[in-house]
Image (cartoon, grey):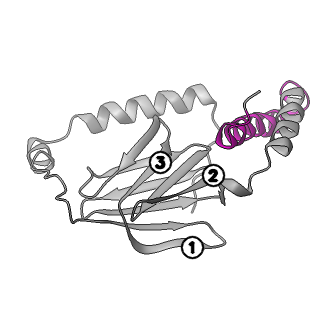
Amino acid sequence: APIHWSGTTTEMALLRTAGARLFSARPAAAFALSSRRTFASGGEKLKLTFATPYETLADNEEVDWVAVPGASGMFGVYPNHVPTVSQMQPGVVQVSRGGETESYFVSGGFAFVHTDSVCELSAAEAVPVEHLDANAAKRMLEESTRDMNAGSEVAQASAHIGVEVSTAIIGATGAHQ
């Protein structure tokens, strides 16, 4: 059965901190294994799968690199990247193939990087940046900001998400206020 979180943001932050402390005390054997990481040679490619619930944007395709808007900030993924699991924040995913870079706005999701130069991006929504409407995002930002302190907790949480996403869209389009 799925687990549903009903705690506060502060409680979630405390759980994340506790979890980080638990996982940082890993056995020496695991550290030795991860410390044998090698770096990519010139001819290696990253295998990318990038999907939303509605479409697959890349299905195990070879790419040069991917830039991901992670929970701790943007990070690049190259062949032989260290294994990583990251929540994606609203922002721009960039995919480089043969010198060409494609940019997609994602509203959130997860990034999984495996030891065998495989990267999987699972996004709730992904839209080519050129399809974004900066004016609509500015209107959404105004509405969401106005609603931040009004209504129920659910309405306030929805407004907070609206502010976060609309701000990221405005940044992605380059239409800063």
Mark 2 — residue? 105
Tell me the residue that label 3 is attached to. 68
158 in the magenta segment: yes
Q: Is residue 141 magenta?
A: no
Secondary structure state at the residue bearing disc 1:
strand
* Real-space CA distance between mark 2 and mark 3, rounded to the nearest whole angstrom: 10 Å
Please identify the quadrant where the N terminus is shown. Answer: bottom right
Q: Give, as a three-letter code, the residue at label 1.
A: Thr
Q: What is the C-alpha distance between the residues marked 2 and 1?
A: 15 Å
- Give residue 126's quadrant in the image: bottom right
Q: Is residue 26 left or right of residue 155?
A: left
Q: Is residue 33 left or right of residue 4?
A: left
* Image coords of residue 129 (percent x, y): 66, 53
Whole-percent x, y for residue 164 in the image = 70, 36
Query: Which residue matches tag 1?
Result: 56
Q: Kindly indicate the quadrant of the structure image that contains residue 128.
A: bottom right
Counting residues from the N terminus, which is met first, the one under dot 2 or under dot 1? Answer: 1
Of residues 15 and 106, the one drawn nearer to the viewer in this rendering: 106
Q: Report how many numbered discs are placed on residues in the image.
A: 3
Residue pictured at 40% horizontal, 74% vertical: 60
In the image: residue 61, left or right of residue 91: left
Q: Which residues are magenta?
A: 148-175
Q: Residue at x 19, y 40 (%)?
A: 26
Q: Are the residues tagged 3 and 1 within 8 Å (C-beta)? A: no
